[in-house]
Amino acid sequence: MRIAKKVVTAVAALGLAGAGLVVGAGTAAAGTNGQQIRLTDASSTIMSMRVSGPAHNGQWSSGCFNRSGMTILTSGWWWKGDVRVEYYHGYGCTNYWSADDVHVPADQGKENWVYLYKHDD
């Protein structure tokens, strides 16, 4: 019984140590191989944006992101290289307004976001 308890304790300790390594590496690695995009719209008329281009892994990706408050975030989506950002006056990427070509660096040091500012006048 005593040996079984030691084995369970050792397995649990290894599991926690392994989980710490995975969580620690994920956060640090993310900002060094791509960035997320954050749009701030000063006019409050852009309701969504579509980002299309290479993801952090080099594969082509495209996603539509809706406004929340004053910002639109690509939370959990990581980009790297030249991407196309399209802006829409409607939610769900409807009612196209304009677009920009944006370069997203692979690494910005401690920063994980590329900040965009728009004003629809």
Image (cartoon, grey):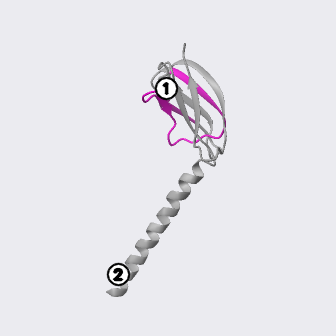
Specify the amino acid type for callout 1: Ser
Judged from this view, the residue extending furthest toward the left is 1
Above or below, 88 against 77 in this view is: above
Above or below, 60 against 41 in this view is: below
Give the mark nearer the N terminus: 2 vs 1.
2
What's the residue at 59%, 41% (across, down)? 35
Q: Name the residue under label 2.
A: 5
In the rendered image, the quadrant that contains the N terminus is bottom left
In magenta segment, residue 73: yes
In magenta segment, residue 85: yes
Q: In this view, does 59 lie to the left or right of 18?
A: right
What's the residue at 64%, 41% (across, down)? 80
Percent position (x, y) of residue 101?
Answer: 66, 27
* Magenta range: 62-88
What's the residue at 59%, 43% (across, down)? 111
Q: Mark 1 points at which residue?
A: 48
User: Circle 2: is it few (<14), some (14-19), or many (20+) Cα within 10 Å?
Assistant: few
Give the structural element (helix, strand or loop) at label 2. helix
